[in-house]
Image (tube, helix red, strand yellow):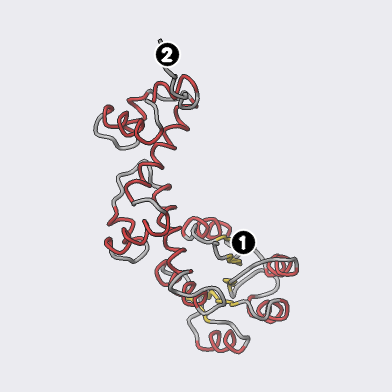
Amino acid sequence: MRKKILFVDDNRDLCADFKLWFEDYDITSASTAEEALAVLARPNEIDLILLDVQLPGMGGLAALERIKALAPDTGVIMMTGFSTKDVAIKALKGRASGYVEKPFALKEMRAAIEKELAGRPGGSPADGDLDAKMAHVKGFIEANCFKKVSLKDAAAAVYLSPKYLSRAFRERTGLGFTEYRLKVKVEQAQAILRSGASTIKQISSRLGYANTESFIRQFKKIAGCVPSSFREAGHCPAPRLKKRA
């Protein structure tokens, strides 16, 4: 089950980008402290809050006190553009779990998130962290299905060795990395075929195949029929039974 994060920042573009960068988590965003408090006042399963210090209206440090009253056991990481000890001390006195300076590096932010969640009930680094990384790899494959991405590329995205990722991905998903990548490509091809917007050759090229024959062969292996049959029926027709003589 994906961990739930409440991301509080008045920069809407950053909120949107954060959801893309950390798509292996379930992200809820709020642009003001008041919006964040409204989310927490309702029944929720928020595991972690990322809270900007500089917010319009009620500032982040003031909001921290209110948040801790509503959700005392939920971790809060402050985000600040002020690299001063004063802000850090105030945040930690307000029972923040830690703080990250803005603009933050993705690797630094991910490390802070994983460290905090690993220390929470149900968030052991051995299981929860690995599940999150496998979800991130699946998202990485899906987001890059029109590009040539390798196991090495995916491993670099989650800071694992290719060998370890290969074994862990199969254990957690039941499919090898290449198998899953082919499955995603075929599913994308099916969507394009249903739309009728492109020829089979164009789809093959768009999905990164060197030749159309290879695409057709792999499509049939995964889907059970050739692309032209799928396009005509909108699905792979059931095989016809031969009549007995």
Q: Residues within 10 Å of mark 2 (few under 14, many from 20)?
A: few
Quarter of the picture containing the C terminus is: top left
Q: Position of residue 102 (x, y in %)?
A: 48, 72
Q: Secondary structure at mark 2?
A: loop
The N terminus: image quadrant: bottom right
Residue at 70%, 74% (x, y): give it.
58
Toward which corner of the image does residue 217 lie, by quadrant?
Answer: top left
Sequence-wise, the earlier of marks 1 and 2 is: 1
Quadrant of the rendered structure where residue 65 is?
bottom right
- Residue 77: x, y in percent? 55, 76
Left or right relative to 151: residue 71: right
According to the image, label 1 marks what residue? 29
Read off the residue under disc 2. 244
Circle 1 — which element?
strand
What residue lies at 47% left-to-right and 72% top-to-bottom? 114
Circle 1 or circle 2, nearest the eye: 2
* Coordinates of residue 92 in the picture (x, y in percent): 57, 87
- Seen as rendered, the residue at the extreme top is 245
Tell me: residue 221, above or below residue 163.
above
Callout 2, which amino acid?
Answer: Arg
Q: Residue at x 55, y 78 (%)?
A: 120
Residue type highlighted by circle 1: Ser
